[in-house]
Image: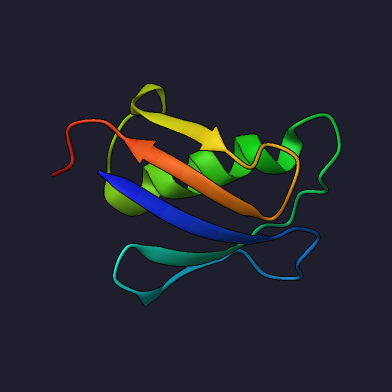
Amino acid sequence: MYINVKVIPNSKVEKIEEVKPLYYKIKTLKAPVKGEANKDVIRIISEHFDIKRKDIKILNGHTNGEKLIKIKDLD
C-alpha cells in the first residue's frame, strides 16, 4: 500500500489523521534535523497501523514535508 503524508515537524502535539483516503497529516514533536522527523514519522505510522517499522519505507520526500510512503503487506 502507498500513502501520501504531509508532515508538520516541531508540533506541540503528536498526531496522525486521515485527511482523505490514502492521504494523512502527521504532526511530530521532532525537528527535521538529521532525519529525526522522518524516523518519528515511521514510528507514528508503525503504531497507527500496528505494523513493524521495517515494513515502512519513505520512497520520496526525504527532505520536504510531502512524502510518499510504502507500507509492505498492508493491502
The residue drawn where x is 69% and y is 55% is 65
Q: Where does the image place residue 12, in percent across and percent down from the top left?
A: 76, 70
Compared with residue 45, is residue 35 higher up or lower down, i.e. above or below? above
The residue drawn where x is 32% and y is 62% is 22
The residue drawn where x is 41% and y is 66% is 23
> For residue 37, which quarter of the picture?
top right
Extreme residue in the top direction: 54
Q: In this rendering, would 18 be left or right of 13?
A: left
Foreground residue among 24 and 29: 24
Foreground residue among 73 and 45: 73
Q: Where does the image place residue 4, in percent across and percent down from the top left?
A: 45, 56
For the C terminus, the quadrant is: top left
Q: Where does the image place residue 38, in percent across and percent down from the top left?
A: 65, 39
Compared with residue 25, is residue 38 higher up or lower down, i.e. above or below? above
Foreground residue among 52 and 6: 6
The residue drawn where x is 67% and y is 57% is 28
Foreground residue among 6 and 12: 6
Q: In this rendering, would 12 be left or right of 6?
A: right
